Amino acid sequence: MSNQCKRLQTRTSGFTLIECAIGMLIMTFLLSALIPPLTAQIEQRQFNDTQTSLTQISDALTGFAIANGFLPCPDRTVGAGANDGIEDLNAGATNCAVAEGNIPWATLGVAGSDSWGNYFRYRVTAAFTDRANPFKLNSNGNITVQCPATSCGTPTIYTNSAPAVLVSHGRNGFGAVNSLTRTLNAAPASNDELANSDGNAAFISRTAGAPSAAAGEFDDQIVWLSTAILLNKMITAQKLP
């Protein structure tokens, strides 16, 4: 075979630069079409995994109460023993050092952080943590979880007597303590997310909203204990009355 024929065969069996460029352009279009659905799937899985962790922690809190006759105290976020996953008691070891902090994951033996690497927030009613005077059938929580009219149109109160509440501060992590740095993330910009990190007993639960939403950004996930259910399980376990 002559050299000319060989060169012709080489040219016809390979790809030209133009053909390669077109191929890469097609691959770029295909990838750009696949990335948004893939991102959405990842975010949904992170949401679901976090919700599962919240449910497991809620069950662990109930189990702890059945075993001990009281709920655990939060792990404080500042000061001695902060962010170590162990519940923090006052000097007398009968009441909590703080009403709100991280979930005491080491004390409970559960996951301490959500899918985005931030500690779960935990607030508990003092009457349910008192070691000297364990809670009774007439005990009631003082934590409120609601959706205000500004966010839901019609104001909705889910509970105003929860013994305890758990919060994941979601993908943006605003208001949470980061589990790697053990430092506080940036404060929330929206009023609803701010309500879940301001240290009082009122919390907000609603559907997620983007920063551009009329009600403001919101991606927190909230789970709370029911006083009635907790007391009923204590009765069933023969821990009450």
Image: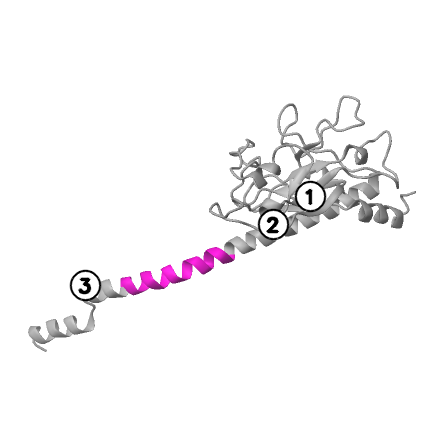
Quarter occupied by residue 77: top right
Instruction: Give the magenta range.
Output: 24-41
Residue 218 in view of the camera: yes
Q: Residues within 10 Å of mark 1 (few under 14, many from 20)?
A: many
Q: For the residue labelled by badge 1, is the local secondary structure a helix, a strand or a loop?
A: strand
Q: Are marks 1 and 2 in contact (CB under 8 Å)?
A: no
Q: In the depicted view, which residue is nearer to us: 8 or 162? A: 162
Look at mark 3 in the image and give the residue it sits on. Answer: 17
Q: In the depicted view, which residue is nearer to us: 212 or 8? A: 212
In the displayed structure, 176 sits above or below 46; it is above
**Residue 221 percent location from the top left of the image:** 61, 47
Q: For the residue labelled by badge 2, is the local secondary structure a helix, a strand or a loop?
A: helix
Q: Amino acid at mark 3?
A: Leu
Look at mark 2 in the image and give the residue it sits on. Answer: 152
Whether the magenta-drawn stretch holds residue 39 is answered as yes
Q: Amino acid at mark 2?
A: Cys
Q: Residues within 10 Å of mark 3 (few under 14, many from 20)?
A: few
**Residue 88 percent location from the top left of the image:** 71, 29
Whether the magenta-drawn stretch holds residue 72 is answered as no
Which comes before the other along the chain, label 3 or label 1? 3
**Residue 176 percent location from the top left of the image:** 57, 37
Q: Residue, x 64% and y 28% (percent of image)?
A: 82
Q: Residue, x 18% and y 66% (percent of image)?
A: 16
Q: In the depicted view, which residue is nearer to us: 126 or 7? A: 126
Look at mark 1 in the image and give the residue it sits on. Answer: 145
Q: Nearer the viewer, mark 1 or mark 2?
A: 2
